[in-house]
Image (cartoon, rainbow, N blue to C red):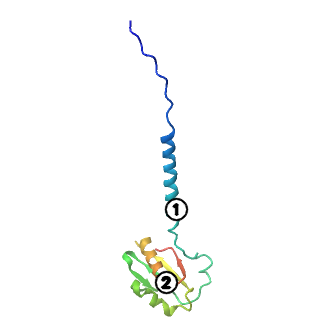
């Protein structure tokens, strides 16, 4: 006759590896959420702010590949703040940024950063065509 071996007692699975994975996922998502918060672009809302505007035109159109126009005339990014200066009474005067065509968000942000570095504080982005 054949003798069968004693059946082994069923082992309970260890929860330690699963808890490790859960904590790693928690840390990953906490860090990932933190990185996204720093990418905010401070802009003014154009709702009621632009409705009562009656000063000189300060429309900066951002086109593809970094091409810029100020009130319809081509301008280099380096010269933009100097060309805006005669049209401004104060640094908090409104400047309207309008992306056109295939302009990327990066190009729009580059223009906004350049104007902020020049001391202009009221930038409004309107929907382009």
- Give the quadrant of the N terminus: top left
Q: Which residue is mark 1?
A: 34
How many numbered marks, from 0 up?
A: 2
Mark closer to the observer (1, 2): 1
Rendered view: 56 above or below 9: below
Q: Label 2: state its secondary structure.
A: strand
Q: Which residue is mark 2?
A: 59
Q: Quadrant of residue 43?
A: bottom right
Instruction: Return the x and y of residue 62 as percentages of the image width and height.
Output: 43, 78
| Extreme residue toward the bottom, this view | 86
Q: Give neighbour class at mark 2: few <14, some 14-19, many 20+ (Cα, 10 Å).
A: some
Instruction: Return the x and y of residue 65 as percentages of the image width and height.
Output: 36, 75
Q: Label 1: state its secondary structure.
A: helix
| Extreme residue toward the top, this view | 1
Rendered view: 106 above or below 12: below
Instruction: Return the x and y of residue 112 as percentages of the image width and height.
Output: 48, 78
Q: Residue at x 49, y 28 (%)?
A: 11
Indicate which disc, 1 or 2, sits on the residue closer to the N terminus: 1
Q: Residue at x 49, y 23 (%)?
A: 9
Instruction: Return the x and y of residue 6 as percentages of the image width and height.
Output: 45, 16
Q: Residue at x 55, y 87 (%)?
A: 91
């Amino acid at each position: 006759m054949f003798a069968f071996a004693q059946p082994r007692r069923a082992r309970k699975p260890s929860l330690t590896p699963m808890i490790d994975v859960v904590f790693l996922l928690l840390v990953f998502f906490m860090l990932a959420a933190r990185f996204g918060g720093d990418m905010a672009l401070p802009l003014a809302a154009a709702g009621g702010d632009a409705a009562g505007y009656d000063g000189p035109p300060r429309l900066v159109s951002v086109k593809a590949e970094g091409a810029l126009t100020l009130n319809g005339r081509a301008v280099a990014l380096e010269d933009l703040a100097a060309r805006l200066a005669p049209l401004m009474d104060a640094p908090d005067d409104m400047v309207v940024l309008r992306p056109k065509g295939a302009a990327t968000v990066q190009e729009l942000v580059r223009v906004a950063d350049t104007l902020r570095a020049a001391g202009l504080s009221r930038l409004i982005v309107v929907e382009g065509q």
